[in-house]
Amino acid sequence: MPGEGVPMRIGLIGTGRIGTFHSAALVGHPGVDSLVVADVDTARAADLAARVGAEAAPSVDALFAAGTAGSGVDALVVTAATSAHAELIGRAARAGLPVFCEKPIALDLPGTLAALAEVEAAGTVLQLGFQRRFDAGYAAAREAVRAGRLGRLHTVRAMTSDPAPPPAAYLPLSGGLYRDCLVHDFDILRWVTGREVVEVYAVGSDAGPAMFREAGDVDTAAVLLTLDDGTLATATATRCNGAGYDVRMELAGEDDQLAVGVNDRTPLTSAEPDGPPAPEKPWPGFLERFAPAYEAELAAFVEVVRGERTNPCDGHEALHALRIAEACERSRAERRPVRLAEIDGG
Ligand SMILES: NC(=O)c1ccc[n+]([C@@H]2O[C@H](COP(=O)([O-])OP(=O)(O)OC[C@H]3O[C@@H](n4cnc5c(N)ncnc54)[C@H](O)[C@@H]3O)[C@@H](O)[C@H]2O)c1
């Protein structure tokens, strides 16, 4: 385990959209001395390495071969496609390496539980990429709730609206809107309120682009969640929000209410004649909206690897969020409220 001032070498697997962003952040981090990247698409890995000033491993296996703790890399960052996460987490655990992995661990509960078991058996670190936990607005909301500044919390409204649908080929690999997208809202709802979800009622609409119907997915979803202290929450998501990338949370209590994600870049126009002006630069996507949060979660991982802080988002946190998404899929399919106690892994 490298401490402060001891050189740290990180390996990153998966050099697509989020891997590109994380690579640049890691290269720019003062605590990271070198970064080696790998991808099944070796040309893509080489190209990214050249652009950000990292090294490219000739293959994922080569990165692991050099990656036994104490010799090659000190830690791994997994930003590969979702289908590869569980296996890479297991390999990292068996190599004794701390790993940061993008959400989700796996798209199903058995895969998630198996990966968690490997990490537990190895006694290694697994930090999950729920970056909203590092967003200044969500952190301030959590503090306000915990300090009692809103009074008794009774209502929470969470939302994630993507500006445009992903490529059609992505949909069958995504796990669907609840597991892929709303899972962030489920995690942050638990984190901000400090409460557990006990029941969900989920509906979805596939009335938009045909590719969602063809994939058995929905383009828009709404969930009613009951928390264990009786607080009611709603979470909505859509892939079709032409106004921009809109991620918000409103928290209402007996004394006050608070909104996360409301500023001059919120892609929302007031219908009031005397309302605030329409945003000039609405958020275009997640990389812009959450850039500081992505950097902060990786900086936290570096501190975790050095043993300077506890893990801010371990694998069990991801399991909780996935169980809520699973309950939503069951609720949508069976058109009924689903208790979390019905879902395995609790
Ligand atoms: N936290 C967030 O806000 C956030 C945002 C975007 C993506 N993600 C997650 O990050 C992951 C990657 O998403 P993306 O948008 O960057 O995808 P992407 O398709 O742009 O990139 C994925 C990369 O992984 C590579 N890859 C696939 N299988 C591999 C394997 N077995 N070994 C090594 N490389 C492999 C692909 O060749 C590709 O380069 C997904 O799991 C996604 O859920 C999280």
Image (cartoon, grey):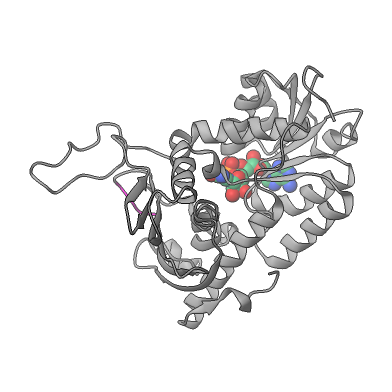
User: Would residue 159 appear left or right of 168 to someone viewing this image?
Assistant: left
Q: Is residue 324 above or below residue 300?
A: below
Read off the magenta span: 238-242
Q: Position of residue 49 (x, y in %)?
A: 68, 24
At a point 71% along the width and 30% down the height, the residue shown is 302
Q: How many marks?
A: 0
Instruction: Indicate the quadrant where residue 59 lies.
Output: top right
- Would you say residue 239 sits in the magenta stretch? yes
Q: Is residue 51 above or below residue 87?
A: above
Quick one: 120 or 113, which is closer to the camera?
Answer: 120
Q: Position of residue 101 (x, y in %)?
A: 69, 44
Can see residue 38?
A: no
Dominant secondary-structure state across the stretch colored magenta = loop
- Would you say residue 40 sits in the magenta stretch? no
The quadrant of the picture occupied by the C terminus is: bottom right
Q: Position of residue 2 (x, y in %)?
A: 83, 26
User: Would residue 35 appear left or right of 294 to someone viewing this image?
Assistant: right
The quadrant of the picture occupied by the N terminus is: top right
Q: Is residue 238 above or below residue 42?
A: below
Residue placed farthest to the left in the image? Answer: 273
Quick one: 91 or 300, which is closer to the camera?
Answer: 300
Which quadrant of the picture is home to ligand 1? top right
Instruction: Indicate the quadrant where residue 234 lies.
Output: bottom left
Can see residue 269?
A: yes
Q: Position of residue 317 (x, y in %)?
A: 65, 55
